[in-house]
Image: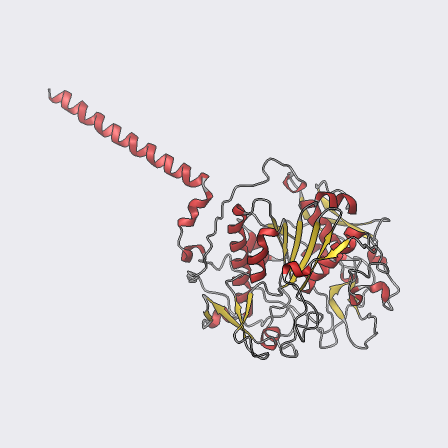
């Protein structure tokens, strides 16, 4: 009798244990399969940035740029930050008012396809520059409808254009030749949006020239008003442009947001008002029109310096309040917080926008030598590949953006190292007006290097 009781108790214990193990296994299986379960995390846990993830970028140049207040001068961008800025300590950052959750383990929406980027060993940023007789893809003389005069080096005093005759060949990637008609057919009924600084505007203008072959197109409609893009009173240029190819209903647009932080004037009736620079909030334009985008390309970098921030009356805000933490106010740390916030917010939106392909482009390198843009620096070299023609590294040369998109479904458009080999392709001292003593070693001649960025973009869409 005692033996029977013993076996009954043992059986009950075994059944309870089996039930517990079954429930636990099911719970973890559900958690792993359901990316939205991560929304149970607290906002504070989601935005707990550790020093290993939060890389402070100390860039060369002066942080005391002399700019006219309230004028967003893009043509003299520098990427400087103070070399003495401290790194964020390993502590939690409260971003509890950030309303959207971050799902770091989203499933691959393109798992049923095998683009070049999925081929084993394919890395678009790893490869070499090779001579190509079919370059450039359009004429720098003819693409006047879309190309800013100051970037059309064929219209300047420059006489050497050997930089136009090369293409990028990635290792182990099946990258098709860019063809304008085929590209527009692929992008039929789609919208491609660039949001970023003046280098983002160069990429936008490059794609417009590539998609038209640099030819005048009467069938391309200006649809900027649909996106609220206009030239504010007293501004040098509009806050963006949008054009639609009527034959394929393809829209290509650009919106100026040099830091990707949301900017909000504190007093809209005062032209000299301070502007709240919300480091943890994406631009209102992105929030408003994200549902209309099929391809989104973000970039930032060269406006993150104290001179630009001061001149534009930007006041850093976090959680809707002026930032008081001096460690976060260091320019490098503020940039890191912003790009991480933007990437995590965008990634959280992708499940509800399944058609959207999101890209974050890495920083475009600058090549000032013997000084900076305002201290006599120059980039007079016209010989290609004095520093080599090949990129063999696997890791990105922009660890800040690479860290921000890691673990997300945002694609890293990594152009830094391959562009760094092309110092002869900058505007340099040449200009339409031939202004003595002015060198632009930040922006590129078009046609030029940004065309390659778009070839890599097209290959990964």
* Residue 311 location (% of width, % of height): 61, 77
Residue 443, image quadrant: bottom right
Q: Residue at x 71, y 49 (%)?
A: 250
Q: Looking at this view, is 240 or 51 the one in front?
A: 240
Q: Image point 74% across, 54% down: which residue?
A: 207
**Is residue 456 positioned above or below 333 on the image?**
above
Name the residue nearer the viewer: 338 or 268: 268
The quarter of the picture where the C terminus appears is top right
Q: Is residue 141 left or right of residue 65?
A: right
- Label count reads 0
Residue 82: % across, % down? 58, 72
Q: Residue 54 location in percent, x, y?
A: 51, 60
Residue furthest to the right: 159
Closest to the observer: 149 or 53? 149
Regarding residue 45, the answer to whether it shows in the image is: yes
Q: Quadrant of the N terminus?
A: top left
Residue 185 found in image quarter: top right
Task: Find residue 449 and report its image quarter.
Answer: bottom right
191 to 200, vertically: above or below: above
**Residue at the spot 83% in from the left edge and 49% down from the top edge:** 132
One can see residue 364 in this view: no
Q: Residue at x 58, y 51 (%)?
A: 291
Colouring convention used in this rendered image of the protein: secondary structure
């Amino acid at each position: 009798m005692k033996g029977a009781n013993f076996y009954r108790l043992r059986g009950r214990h075994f059944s309870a244990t089996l039930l517990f193990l079954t429930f636990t296994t099911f719970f973890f299986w559900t958690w792993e399969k359901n990316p939205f379960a991560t929304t149970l995390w607290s906002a504070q846990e989601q935005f707990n940035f550790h020093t290993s993830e939060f890389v402070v970028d100390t860039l060369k140049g002066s942080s005391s740029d002399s700019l006219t207040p309230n004028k967003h001068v893009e043509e003299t961008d520098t990427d400087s930050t103070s070399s003495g800025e401290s790194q964020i300590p390993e502590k939690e950052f409260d971003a509890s008012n950030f309303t959207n959750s971050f799902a770091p383990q989203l499933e691959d929406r393109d798992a049923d396809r095998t683009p070049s980027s999925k081929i084993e060993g394919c890395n678009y940023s790893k490869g070499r520059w090779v001579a190509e007789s079919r370059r450039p893809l359009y004429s720098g003389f003819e693409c006047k409808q879309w190309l800013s005069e100051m970037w059309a080096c064929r219209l300047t005093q420059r006489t050497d254009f050997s930089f136009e005759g090369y293409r990028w060949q990635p290792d182990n990637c099946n990258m098709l030749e860019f063809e304008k008609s085929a590209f527009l057919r692929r992008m039929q009924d789609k919208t491609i949006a660039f949001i970023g600084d003046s280098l983002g505007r160069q990429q936008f203008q490059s794609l417009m020239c590539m998609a038209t072959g640099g030819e005048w197109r009467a069938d391309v409609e200006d649809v900027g008003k649909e996106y609220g893009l206009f030239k504010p009173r007293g501004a040098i240029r509009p806050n963006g442009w949008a054009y639609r190819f009527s034959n394929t209903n393809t829209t290509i647009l650009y919106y100026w947001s040099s830091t990707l932080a949301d900017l909000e004037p504190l007093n809209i009736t005062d032209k000299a008002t301070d502007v709240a620079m919300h480091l943890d909030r994406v631009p209102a334009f992105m929030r408003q029109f994200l549902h209309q985008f099929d391809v989104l390309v973000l970039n930032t970098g060269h406006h993150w310096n104290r001179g630009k921030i001061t001149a534009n009356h930007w006041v850093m805000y976090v959680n809707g309040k002026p930032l008081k933490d001096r460690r976060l106010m260091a320019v490098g740390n503020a940039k890191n917080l912003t790009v991480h916030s933007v990437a995590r917010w965008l990634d959280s939106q992708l499940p509800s926008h399944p058609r959207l392909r999101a890209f974050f482009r890495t920083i475009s390198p600058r090549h000032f030598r013997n000084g900076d843009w305002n201290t006599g620096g120059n980039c007079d070299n016209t010989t290609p590949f004095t520093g080599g023609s090949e990129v063999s590294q696997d890791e990105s040369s922009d660890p800040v953006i690479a860290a921000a998109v890691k673990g997300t479904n945002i694609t890293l458009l990594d152009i830094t190292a391959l562009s760094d080999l092309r110092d002869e392709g900058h505007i340099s001292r040449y200009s339409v007006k031939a202004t003595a003593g002015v060198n632009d070693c930040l922006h590129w001649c078009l046609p030029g290097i940004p065309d390659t960025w778009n070839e890599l973009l097209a290959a990964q869409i």
